Image: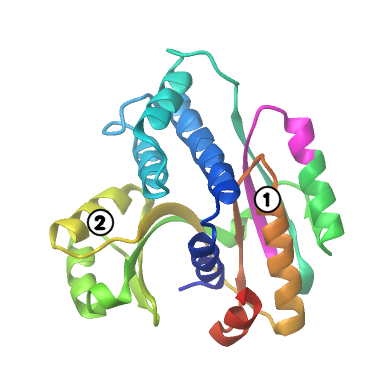
Amino acid sequence: MSGHSKWSTIKRKKAANDAARAKIWSKLLRFVEVAAREGGGDPDANPTLATAVQKAKAASVPNENIERAIKRGTGELQGEAYEETSYEGYGPGGVAIYVRCFTNNRNRASQEVRSTFNSGGGKLSEPGAVAWMFEPKGVVLVPAASATEEDVFLVAADAGAEDVRGSEESIEVITPTDSLKPVRDALQAAGIEVESSDLTMIPKTTVSLDGGDAKKVLSLIDALEELDDVSEVYANFDISEDVMASLAS
């Protein structure tokens, strides 16, 4: 599993308090709303919306909240006009960072992201500076205790997966973006538990970090993810599991 994926998994498991959950729900519902506006309100005909809805449900967002977000996106209900935008830059140790936002105020989002980069020892760059270092992919996580890597590979490969990577806690299945749902559905149909599935940006190359730079980069990423307008942060760092575990504690 990539370094950023491991850190995201650790944080997701720790985000159990009400305040953290409310912020996560708000961001997930923005994703649902924007996906519905851009591709229509039918998840069966809009793969991005299907992913957004699945993520919201996995985070225990109530169905009625999801339905209202879809209706705001399609114009059936009045709501804020959110739009997607992105920012690119570098963090400590030369780590490339790609920030995805859903915002109703581009100026605010830009100012807050820039300020957070600066205060965290990073630097915001021009559009295109780091985007080429990442590839859009689908990622399905399977708990390692629920199936063997071989069983996951056999099912996932038949459904269109590109790669399967095992770790102590999870088995990571990499898919083309349009194969995310078929792969997830095939694994579930085979009785294999799916912990999460998501559209993401996977780095083509990674930067190895030691304890000092690792702590600075993770602090910067955490600060960016705390911003209300920020939906996702992707980075190309690689940190050993021992160092990551010590920082998480």
Query: Which residue is at the front of the view, 246 or 192?
Result: 246
Give, as a three-letter code, the residue at label 1. Glu
Q: Which residue is denoted by mark 1 in the rendering?
A: 226
Query: Which residue is at the front of the view, 206 or 80?
Result: 80
Q: Crowding at label 2, few (<14), some or many (≥20) Cα neighbours within 10 Å?
A: many
Find residue 79 and report its image quarter.
Answer: top right
Which of the two marks, 1 or 2, is nearer to us in this view? Answer: 1
Q: Which residue is drawn at 86% across and 58% down?
A: 119
Where is residue 186 shown, x and y percent of the image? 18, 56
Where is residue 5 shown, x and y percent of the image? 50, 66
Residue 236 visible (yes or no): yes
Q: Residue at x 37, y 28 (%)?
A: 64
Q: Is mark 2 on a helix, strand or loop?
A: helix
Farthest residue, direction left: 190
Q: Locate the C terminus and report the quarter of the image it occupies.
A: bottom right
Give the residues in magenta.
94-110
Q: Which residue is denoted by mark 2 in the rendering?
A: 183
Q: Is mark 1 on a helix, strand or loop?
A: helix
